[in-house]
Image (tube, rainbow, N blue to C red):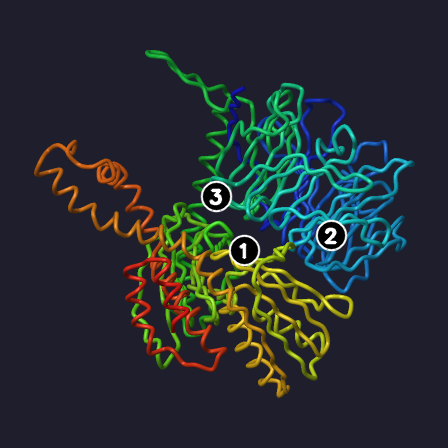
Amino acid sequence: MEVNLNRVDYVQVGVTSQKTMRLLPTSGRRATQKVAVADHDGVITCFGMKKGDPIPVFKTLPGQKIFRLTLGGALGTPQEKIFISSGSEVRGFTKKGKQFLSFEANLTESIKAMFVSGPDLFVCGSYIYNHYYDCKDQDYYLSGDKINDIVCLPMDGAKPITPILACQDRILRVLQASDLKYEIEISGPPTVLELNNGNGGDSGEEILYGTSDGKLGLVHITDSEPVPKWEVANEKKRGGILCIDCFDIIGDGVKDVLVGRDDGKVEIYGFDSSLEPILRFEHVLPESITSIQGGCVGKDNFDEVVTTTYTGWVTGLTTETQQKEAGPGEEMKMSQEIQNKVAALRGELEQLQLKVLQEREKFQQCAQSSTAISSVPVFSVNDKFTLCRDDASYSLILEVQTAIDNVLLQSDVPIDLLDVDKNSAVVSFSGCDSEPNGNFLLATYRCQANTTRLELKIRSIEGQYGTLQAYVTPRLQPKTCQVRQYQIKPLSLHQRSHVIEQNRPMNTLTLTGPFSFAEIHSWVVFCLPEVPEKTPAGDSVTFCFQNTFLDTQLDCTYSKGKGDFKSDNISTISILKDVLSKEATKRKINLNISYDINEESVNHTLKLIHPKLEYQLLLAKKVQLIDALKELQVHEGNIDFLIPEYRSILEDADHLIEEYKKQPAHLERLYGMITDLFIDKFKFKGTNVKTKVPLLLEILDNYDPSSLVAFFDSA
């Protein structure tokens, strides 16, 4: 069934956080609803629509930044009370704006996620979960990793309270009272949770989740173990999911799933005979979608999808037709109401233009006077630096509340910048002197007009670590800039996992010494991404990782005074040995280092590299042939005499060149990994083989797997 929705912008508030907009319920099924939205200025704005204009219901005074807004009320009654969290405080307001609750949760962290059900209040900081009943402390839980969201199964008298935490380590944690009931591993870091159909589905136990790498899934929470229902993969590399809602926008009697992503995409997934959802509609907004909900706001009897963006725009995608088309020779007549509205808008625009001119002149006069004082404009930057498993690269997303003028990237470690299809900015590189200053990259992205969001991709080299800095300059006067720093870690291409294959040939590194549990944990945080900065509870901990480029694995188990690190890649062990010993030396801690090298692991790693190396060599050869084949085609005019392999190269020439451009220095990267593996293998034997590297590169240029293995064994 085709869905036609038309965009209409309602109001703009301040910068918003995730899940800070809700539609207040009404008595009628398709009567217009009021919208409540909270922003970083600490203001709650509640408005309704009347004759196409937003009419304020109430607006609170500015205060502390608001992270969450949700609705609640007595069970069995309309959920029309507004609850917001700012800092460690929860406040409640009636639908008319009267404050009836101010509750200090006494958390050491700001409340980042919240759920309200009747007298029960569930709040989460970065790692702490608390449950309150009538504002009295009930349950407490300390999570092993950062909490992104919380939802609670619908409560009836027969079932115990079941909160579910979405945690950064790709785990949904199901709680019972203050205890962990069980864990659900999912394929990406969950960023948002919602009850299926708004009530948990037919069973009341179904949870929808969205991940930061763009996957959407449904899981059934039972008493004993979870039952995964479906998961929609992110094959088109869309942005991460920030918000979800369930609403029957199509009108077929089945609630659809509404999804908002951090790249501005709004999606509607419907259901037909199959159990899995099907994408029915998508629309792109220029900013990340922080909140989404289905309802009726603009006009009675017209359903719509209401969204809030990062910069505070409240926008509707409505089923109401927003424009009329005139046929040939026909005149389009505007109603008196629309004519008055257009005239009012024109008058308002003229007043604004006049005011801008006056203020600009005033600023120029102040700037030229001897007592001129220039105030630096403050602007908010929303940034995200995440490892993408699919192509072993890092995605850097920068979003500013005003138009971006340019972004300057500087790195003190070698990194590659990859092409991003969504990126329309013009990039220029400056020469760098890496030796004295340790400056390996200086690149400037100049953005087109009205660009508020920029997405970049980089690929790092494991073993080389340092800092990437982004200098963000918006189109503001006077010129100002904000700097954001991102750590490139020694094992930067490793991603957290929860399964280790036991049958792989593993190398072991063991550290012992007078270090505390917190100290060795800080070293692991320094070396590896996706490790919680907070020291885990207990006496010891185990973290598992997978290399996103090579699929090699790493197992880290450590406690006070001892650390065991196992990997099927010698180079990983070598990097850990060098970095950990360096960090211990900084703190003047004596380490006893021992290692057990498995010779079989070298051939195992070469086998993992083989398909990637073979593919890249073949791709490079094909690209080299394209120009010659095209010249032959022009000269002969016919390519039927060519063998099928050459004909297919000519037919796929554009695709091959595009793919080759997307993988800059890919072949060199693989050569570097094999060279490091060769050097590290003999380094653990106490032999320096750097003089044999030219011979190794010669073998790689005439690549043959058996010759390469023989060289590793004979050297």
Q: Secondary structure at mark 2?
A: strand
Q: Residues within 10 Å of mark 3 (few under 14, many from 20)?
A: few
Amino acid type of the residue that numbered disc 3 sits on in the rendered structure: Lys
For label 1, the crowd category at 10 Å Cα-Cα, with few meaning under 14, some 14 to 19 and many 20 or more, is some
Q: Position of residue 531 (x, y in %)?
A: 63, 63
Give the residue number, with chain letter if any, for mark 1: 382
Residue 640 visible to the viewer? yes
Residue 36 in the figure: left or right of residue 261: right
Nearer the viewer's eye, disc 3 or disc 1?
3
Residue type indicated by callout 2: Ser
Q: Dot 2 surroundings within 10 Å: few (below 14), some, or many (20 or more)? A: many
The structure residue drawn at horizontal position 45% and vertical position 49%, both measured from the top left corner, is 355
Distance between the Cα atoms at labels 2 and 1?
A: 20 Å
Q: Could you say which disc has been placed on residue 237 in the image?
A: 3
Query: Would you place residue 189 above or below residue 249 in this image?
Result: below
Q: Position of residue 327 (x, y in %)?
A: 37, 13
Residue 383 in view (yes/no): no
Q: Give the residue number, with chain letter if any, for mark 2.
A: 85
